[in-house]
Image (tube, grey):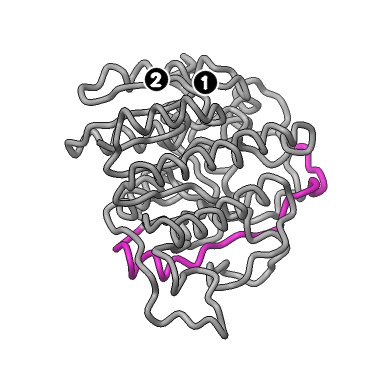
Amino acid sequence: MILVTGSAGFIGFHVVQALIARGERVVGVDNITPYYDPTLKLARLARLEALPGYQHHRIDLADRDAAAGLFREVQPRGVVHLAAQPGVRYSLEHPEAYVDSNLVGFLSVLEGCRATQPAHLVFASTSSAYGANAALPFSPHQPANHPLTLYAATKLANESMAHAYAHLFGFPCTGLRFFTVYGPWTRPDMALYRFADAIVAGRPIEVYGQGRMQRDFTYVDDIVSGVIAALDRPASPDPDWRSEAPDPASSGVAPWRILNIGAGTRVELMTYIEVLSEALGRPARLNLMPMQPGDIARTEADISDTRRLLGYTPTTSVEVGVRRFADWYCEYHGVSRA
């Protein structure tokens, strides 16, 4: 039995489907928070609940007793922890939501793993962890000590908490730093969805950083393949790790590691918008704006470790992935291409 938290979320929804497709039984956890319109989460959940082998629990992981009871009941063989309070800008106005979900909720997961000793805990971290670091491509072997948002700070805290629990209690932990995930069923607060809404409505798109920002856009199917490959390959202590020159990506005292999951390429935001506009068959009107607080100019993942350790190979170009998103968006919203 695999336990997937955040199963009605964007990435969790796709991970659950992939696990069930290969014959796993999955218990999903999601409390359907109203951070964005729950209608989309409920639509994802309805599809999951129609799958044989899926069982859903609607609990808040910050409820320690409920979380502990779930772990006792399920006794998971593996855990994929994707539940979190997402978003960078939301943290500027609602910091308490990040503490409750990303810190207290993650502690509940670690305590559940301590009690049940799964073969592996895989948890979502973020490319935002690199913060003020400007050395591209971003490597997990570089220190990540200067987060620019509370969201990123909570994810870095998750990585440290997992290391402590892996060391103290022996269950393997792998943190995956995701890079700008997109695709069908994405969150409506994500850039691609907001851009599509504006293009279809004929509204100008607010394009921050004058459209010159570059991102390592990663299609959700590639993210899922990385998550499942990580789950199948539990972390172990690194025999080459040296305490006098500690590697931030691994550990000599714990079965723990940090890996990037990205496409390994940079695409300019304007290109992303142009591909979407073409896929929707409608022109994009642009309102160019300066960078927002907490944004960074460029991201690019060093995925050499992920390739070597997991056999990970991203295969979906932005042109293909954005087209698939546009197909889903038009079907889901009943939009005809102009």
| Residue at 69% over, 67% down | 133
Which secondary structure is most common in the magenta stretch? loop
Q: Amino acid at mark 1?
A: Ile
The one of 287 and 136 positioned closer to us in this rendering: 136
Confirm whether residue 281 shows in the render: no
Q: Within 10 Å of the Cα at label 1, are there few (<14), some (14-19), or many (20+) other Cα atoms?
A: many
Label 1: which residue? 32
Residue for point 48% across, 55% down: 165
Q: For residue 58, what is the image quadrant?
A: top left
For this orientation, the residue located farthest to the left is 23
Percent of width and height locating residue 301: 52, 63
Residue for badge 2: 45
Three-letter amino acid code at disc 2?
A: Leu
State which region is magenta. 287-313
Question: Does residue 116 lie above or below 185 as drawn?
Answer: below
Q: Is residue 95 above or below residue 308?
A: above
Left or right of 82 in this view: 48 = left
Q: Quadrant of the N terminus?
A: top left
Distance between the Cα atoms at labels 2 and 1?
Answer: 9 Å
Pick whichever, 266 or 335, lies toward us: 266
Which secondary structure lies at badge 2?
helix
Q: Residue at x 54, y 17 (%)?
A: 38
The reply to whether dot 2 and dot 1 touch (C-beta < 8 Å) is yes
**Discs 2/1, front:** 1
Q: Is residue 64 magenta?
A: no
- On the image, the x and y values in percent for residue 114 come to 41, 46
Q: Is residue 303 magenta?
A: yes
Mark 2 and mark 1 lie on one chain; the one further toward the N terminus is: 1
Q: Quadrant of residue 3?
A: top left
Q: Residues within 10 Å of mark 2 (few under 14, many from 20)?
A: some
Say which of 293 and 163 sits in front. Answer: 163
